[in-house]
Image: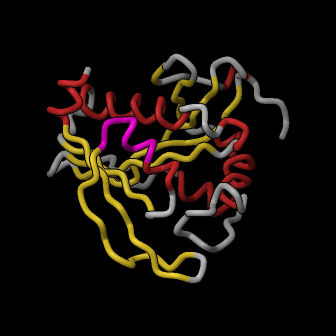
Amino acid sequence: MSEVKEDKVFPFIEGENVSLCPLNMDHINLYTKWKNDPQVRKYDWNKFPQTIEEVKKSFEPKKQDVKVELFFEIWHNNDKKPIGFIGLPHIQWFTRSAYIFYLVGDTNYWGQNIATEAGKLVVNYCFSELNLHKITARTVSPNLASRRVAEKIGFTHEITVKKEIYLNGEHIDILEYAIFKEDWMKSQ
């Protein structure tokens, strides 16, 4: 990857270790690398390889009157580089709810609470600025790291969808976690 130019980084939400920036299409090769990395995509529901064009298209703003998805690049403040992305791929304005996803693509940063910090920043933004009521996180049952991130952010297990995903030769459960605005605000 070519050296990341800091003058193209525009933090939208600043955190202690990471900041959340608009996606930077100059980093699309890196995003594509993460989406195709066998270690990173181990629990990903999309089992097909993704080209640069496909990844770029998945992040391009949709032509719509109301924005129903929001994506951020996770920028490491000290190391001054992108290390993952996080977002809300489906905002439901009528019910004031959304789904959150997080991916730390640079495996050198796994186990350092990066997804937890980024998740807390997004949750706070959702409740304090977007005035959402509920945020849901979904993961597959074997993904213990993702489950821990959801719990450390403050999500609680809400439902289990039995044998919903076929992964590594078996059907496994999807776990849904939720956090409500009133619970988040009490904890702050």
Q: Position of residue 148 (x, y in %)?
A: 44, 44
Q: Residue at x 33, y 46 (%)?
A: 67
- Quadrant for the C terminus, please: top left
Give the percent coordinates (x, y) of residue 186: 18, 24
Asked if residue 52 is positioned above or below residue 104 in the image, the reply reads below
49 left or right, relative to 188:
right
Q: Residue 154's quadrant in the figure? A: top left
Question: Is there any visible trace of residue 65 in the rendered image?
Answer: no
Which span is picked out in magenta?
Answer: 148-155
Magenta segment, principal secondary structure? helix
Q: Looking at the image, which residue is at 18% across and 45% down?
A: 96
Relative side of 112 to 88, left or right: right
Residue 75 left/right relative to 14: right
Residue 94 pos. (x, y %): 15, 51
How is the rendered protein coloured? secondary structure
Q: Is 26 above or below relative to 60?
A: above
Residue 154 included in the magenta stretch of the image: yes
Along the viewing direction, whichever of 65 and 102 lies nearer the viewer: 102
